[in-house]
Each structure stands twice: as C-alpha cells, then as structure tokens.
Image: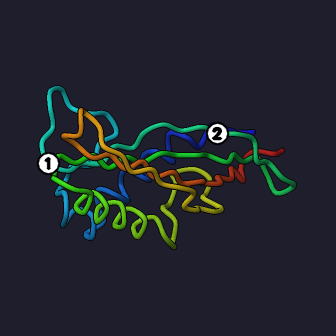
C-alpha cells in the first residue's frame, strides 16, 4: 500500500474544484481544505474526510481512497446545494485531476447524503467518491 499520494490527491481535488467554472459560477472561491475562522454565509464546499485502503497490484503500489466532499448552504431548500453538488460531480469526471506524483487510475461517484443541519437552518450534502491512486514509482 502507499498513502504517499494522499496529500497530492487532496491538492489536486482542491485545484480542480476551485478552478471549475461550473462550480465557481455558483459559489465563487468558497472551496475550502481548512475552514476559515468564524461563521461562513452562503454556499461553500469543504474537502473532508478520507479513508484509504491498499489497492496495490502487479503494476505497482496503490490505494483506494474514499473521499468526502461536502456542500454546505444556508439557502432555503436544497436547490442551491444540489446545483453545487452536481457541479462537483461534473468537475471530477474525465479526465481525472493530475497528481504531482503517481496518477489517478480511477475516480467514481459512490454516494451522497443530503440533510438539514443546525436546527434546520442550513443544508449539507456529503458526496463520497472512490478514487484509486497508483504510484508507479514504488514496487509492490
């Protein structure tokens, strides 16, 4: 297994989402890896939790990452959050983001969960993606 590509994967996801016109047209530059201090108004995206497991094969070391990207919105209803979630899915379709080391061998939408949070004042959609990374520089 190799977790060596995880930081590069996070950076590549951030760069892709922050540079995707379909998403930035909806939320501006409100894509975060780490949330700023204080409350955030409007709709924003957070690259969140990740789990990884070994996915090495005969071609090299690799990992299967389960990455959560959250959309959080104070808009009434789920419409705005769902439009942002759709833009995220579009942004992560082919071709996959480039990594500084290794490559993304596969990227798939896994699931989503939409819910009300903060006593119903905000909406949150957690999008989970499965991403297989391969580090061709490392032997199995």
Q: Which mark is residue 124?
A: none
**Residue 88 horizontal/vertical position (percent):** 37, 62
The reply, left or right, for residue 38 in relation to residue 140 is left
Disc 1 secondary structure class: loop
Q: Is residue 103 above or below residue 61?
A: below
Find the distance from the CA under tag 2 to the CA under tag 1: 31 Å
> Closest to the observer: 124 or 1?
124
- Can you give x and y, in whole percent of width and height, for residue 20 in the image? 30, 65
Q: Do callouts 2 and 1 mark residues in contact (Cβ within 8 Å)?
A: no
Q: Relative to 14, is 37 on the left or the right? A: left
Quadrant of the rendering where the N terminus is positioned: top right
Residue bearing mark 1 = 42
Residue at the (68%, 50%) spot, across then down? 135
From the viewer's perspective, is residue 12 above or below residue 118? Answer: below
Residue farthest toward the right in the current orientation of the protein: 58
Where's residue 87, x and y in %?
Answer: 34, 66
Give the left or right position of residue 124, taking residue 96 as reference: left
Viewer-proximal residue among 71 and 48? 71
Snapshot quadrant of residue 36? top left
Disc 2 target residue = 52
Q: Is residue 17 above or below residue 86?
A: above
């Amino acid at each position: 297994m190799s977790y060596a590509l995880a930081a590069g994967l996070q950076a590549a996801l951030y760069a892709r989402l922050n540079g995707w016109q379909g998403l930035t047209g909806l939320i501006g530059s409100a894509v975060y890896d780490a949330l700023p201090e204080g409350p955030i108004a409007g709709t924003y995206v957070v690259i969140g939790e990740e789990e990884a497991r070994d996915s090495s094969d005969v071609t090299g070391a690799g990992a299967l990452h389960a990455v959560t990207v959250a959309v959080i919105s104070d808009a009434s209803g789920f419409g705005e959050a769902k439009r942002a979630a759709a833009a995220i899915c579009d942004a992560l379709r082919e071709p996959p983001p480039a990594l500084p080391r290794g490559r993304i061998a596969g990227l798939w939408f896994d699931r989503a969960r939409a819910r009300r949070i903060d006593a119903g004042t905000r909406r949150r959609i957690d999008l989970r993606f499965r991403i297989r990374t391969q580090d061709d520089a490392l032997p199995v």
